[in-house]
Image: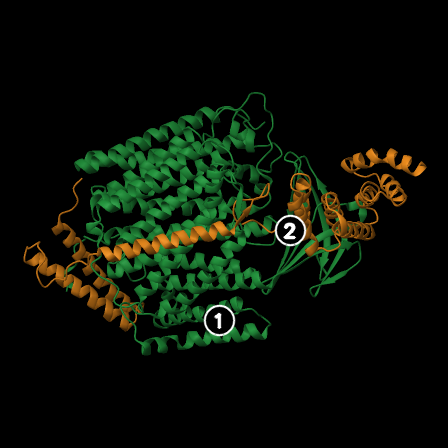
Chain colours: A orange, B green
Amino acid sequence: MEGPTEREMLEEQLDFLLDSLRDLEREREAGDIDDDDYRSLRDDYVSRAAAISHQLRGDEIDRPDDTPPLPRRTWPRRIVAVLVVLSLAAGSGAWVASSAGQRLPGQSSSGGIEESTATRLSTARQLNFSDPTKAIEIYNEVLKVEPDNAEALTYRAWLIALTAREATGNLRDVAYATVLADLARARGVDPGYPDAACFLGIVHFRFLGDARSAKPEIDECKAMNPPAEVESFVDAISAELDKALAD
Amino acid sequence: MLGVTGVAGPLGRAALLVGLVGAVFGLVSAVTGTRQSDPKVLRLVPRFAWLTGIASLGAFVCMEWAMITRDFSLAYVQKVGSWSTPALYNFTAVWSALEGSILLWLMVLTFLTVGIAVKYRAKLDDPMVGWALATMFFVGVFFFVLTLGPANPFAAGPAGVLDGPGPNPLLQNHVLVVFHPPILYLGYVGFTVPFAFAIGALVTGRVGEGWLLETRRWALMSWGFLTFGIILGSWWSYEVLGWGGVWAWDPVENASFIPWLTGTAYIHSVLVQERRGMLRVWNLSLLVSTFSLTILGTFLTRSGVLNSVHAFSDGQIGPFLLTFFAVIVLASVVLIGWRGDLLRSPGTIDSPLSREGAFLANNVLFGVFAFVVLLGTVFPLIVEALQDRQLVVGEPFFDRLGVPVGLTLLFLMCVAPVLPWRKASGELLSQRLFWPAWGGTLALLVSVVVGATGIAPLLTFFLGGFAGGAALRQLALATRRQGLRGLVGRANGGMVVHIGVILIAVALAASNSFTRSQELTLKLDTPIEWGGHTFELVGFSREEDDRQTRISARVEVDGTERAPAVTKYLKMGNNIGTPSVLTTLTKDIYVTLEPPVKMDSGTAKIKVFVKPMIVWIWVGGAMMAVGTVLAMFPGRRRKPTDPVSAPVPEAAAP
């Protein structure tokens, strides 16, 4: 596909510059442009138009000696430009990689709206069994905003209790002390919340071997009609608890 | 039943087929007519443009008809239609999912093609116009193929379906669904026009400044629609999503923001090419980038590759869009490379302290910002494709980038409007910056007096006052000379846009830095004080119909009753919160009702945000829209569509 001849291009350039000069006069007349801008642009247009006219008048398409050649990029400049762009790209890549984190279910791949406590708790509930560490992190975030959230206190305590089963010695004692304190606090905050009582009973009996302390908690839990998934834990130990107390 | 059903599908498919044929013939006649300079063939081009426009309009009307009559023979109506959806949201349901939104896109595109064909009907023999129209038809062919293939809105659905779920609950919760998507599409699709002329310029080799003048107003119009569409989207997000924010760096938001950044860079740098003949390759690259980024954004939004608040995550459209994106980029790069010698600029920047120097700095910032936002958006997708790991690039990454870039751009907005072309002297600058600098100082003092703290917000308020002073100075000079007529024209309309941007920047800085929020548990008739405001639960109300169950908590905020609500959309099963926003000039009190709502308990858990200056974001958006309209008027310049090769009147010739 052929492009325009150089003469046609020069003519188009000249027309453009002449029109631009007319625009400039109108803009100055209208007050859209100040005197400094006007002078500098007019000088620029006139010098470019004069150079092109010179070429066209002589019908000489080869550039005359007095017309400045079009600037050419030198190789060192190109290499520097490429290096700058590559460095920028590499730096940005490293930065974004270091800023990325694990995506949770339902989360968008970038940004994301600030979630309400209800949404956070819902996410944490889904992770209770699949990723308890992440779930504990979310409960911690909820408790930062709402220190008396009964659900967050209860389930964080329950997940810590499950994790602490593997621990020994002082660490285990400290963990269970924290668990019991949080569960008791959850009960205090919301006495009608059955899960806290249920887990308190389970922790006393299963993890600390204290049937006597567990019994009233389990009874209270059952009386409050706990949710099905918690009730299944309670039913599983109820008979054992009665037997232990009878012994 | 509302009448004839079952005809929309065949009629719609027929209309799309006719449109495809029209687009193919339009493409062929534009190319052959231009190559052979055959006026008879070229005269056919506008007719084919009209044919594609009428066909796409016909298809759109068929789709609306199918939706209104609840024609459940169509899979698309089964997906987004429902007998229980109210008329307004049923109308907008057409663009509430993949296939319908592509149909809307197509309709806008074909009517832009008609617009170009009509506007340049006397200049069809100009090869640049011919190639531009061929490009428009080429893009049209692609979108017709999409609507007849992977995104066919008229595909038949399974038999026996009598009702559907209706549109996504978020798309039937606020009236802005009527305006936000079409306006955004006008912006996206509008950039096809300057892109088409850029391709025309490259093919014909007429890469001087002439083609810019042809497309100046189209580019500005598209940018204006994109800007307004993004602002409306933020408003919608704020009013509907209930998280109290206006921008979340969600991938779909980013998909609209990235072309906006390159488009904004273009409408600045194009001035340098018009005035000084420089940045030719850069401007062409920006236009190509902006158009291809709209296609990439469409891929991200509609291919199902990402999760987002409002992505349409289904369909087999991804490979088509990605291939088209690759073709566009490759063809453009090849053309720019081919015309490399012609694209060398005849001039250079004389001094960095000049208007063109400031525009170049502005472009570097916009370019880097666009690149890094794009990287942050696609990085998780690349990692997932290569390593099957699901990552998120969170809000802090984008904020850490956005704050310094935004502050630097504000600084440029202080200085650039007062800089002359070519070179500025220190004396001139100090004289012109004197009053704007005092504006910045005053803004800083007021901010400190009202209790603002923190380096970034205080710097924003100072630079906002400074940049506002610079813009007002130019407007004052122009109106002093010409009265209100001085507000018209690109330079001064642009200053009105700047003031809008400054308002948005200041409001964002204030709301992001000084928002307070708290979750409160309210008991009936028991006022709670928080943040200097009183909140009292005075009751509940429950509305129920066959579409939704809506529970509102009646909460008195400083004695004014508000009603944040939670709506359960029965067919979807989703709980959607509807915040209640009490707006004043200085702050919004934003209240959401947190599920689960237990009306019997006599308590309600609410989340309250006190957000300063939010209303100024919307005022700033409106000012940007007004400024864009003012800038589109030609002022005292020649009509932008006048041919640059028109004979110069003798009297005016030097």
Task: Describe the element under mark 2 as helix, strand or loop.
Answer: loop
What residue occupies the far top of the structure in this picture?
B159
Give the farthest residue toward the front: A169
What's the chain of the residue with tag 1? Answer: B
Q: Residues within 10 Å of mark 2 (few under 14, many from 20)?
A: many
Asked if disc 2 and disc 1 are in contact, CB closer than 8 Å, the reply is: no
Assess disc 1: are there few (<14), some (14-19) or many (≥20) residues with their C-alpha within 10 Å of its C-alpha. Answer: many
* Amino acid type, mark 2: Pro
Residue A233 percent location from the top left of the image: 79, 36
Q: What's the mark number on residue A56? A: none
Q: In the picture, residue A207 is in which quadrant? A: top right
* Image location (x, y in percent) of residue B441: 48, 76
Report whether residue B489 is seen: no
Residue B618 visible, this orientation? yes
Q: Is residue A10 left or right of residue B505?
A: left
Q: With B649 as the anchor, is B274 left or right in this view?
A: right
Type of amino acid at the residue the image marks with label 1: Phe
The answer to whether residue B386 is above or below residue B163 is: below
The label on residue B579 is: 2
Query: Which quadrant, please, contains the N terminus of chain B?
Result: top right
Q: Label 2 lies in what chain?
A: B
What residue lies at 34% left-to-right and 60% top-to-bottom? B490
Please provide percent x and percent y for residue B469: 43, 71
Along the line of sight, which residue is nearer the eye, A14 or B492?
Answer: A14
Q: Is residue A150 or residue B163 the one in the foreground? A: A150
In which quadrant of the rendered image does the C terminus of chain B lie? Answer: bottom left
Q: Position of residue B237 (x, y in %)?
A: 56, 50
Instruction: Kindly identify which numbered label has been placed on residue B462.
Output: 1
Could you tell which of marks 2 and 1 lies nearer the N-terminus? 1
Q: Secondary structure at mark 1?
A: helix
A18 left or right of B448 in image: left
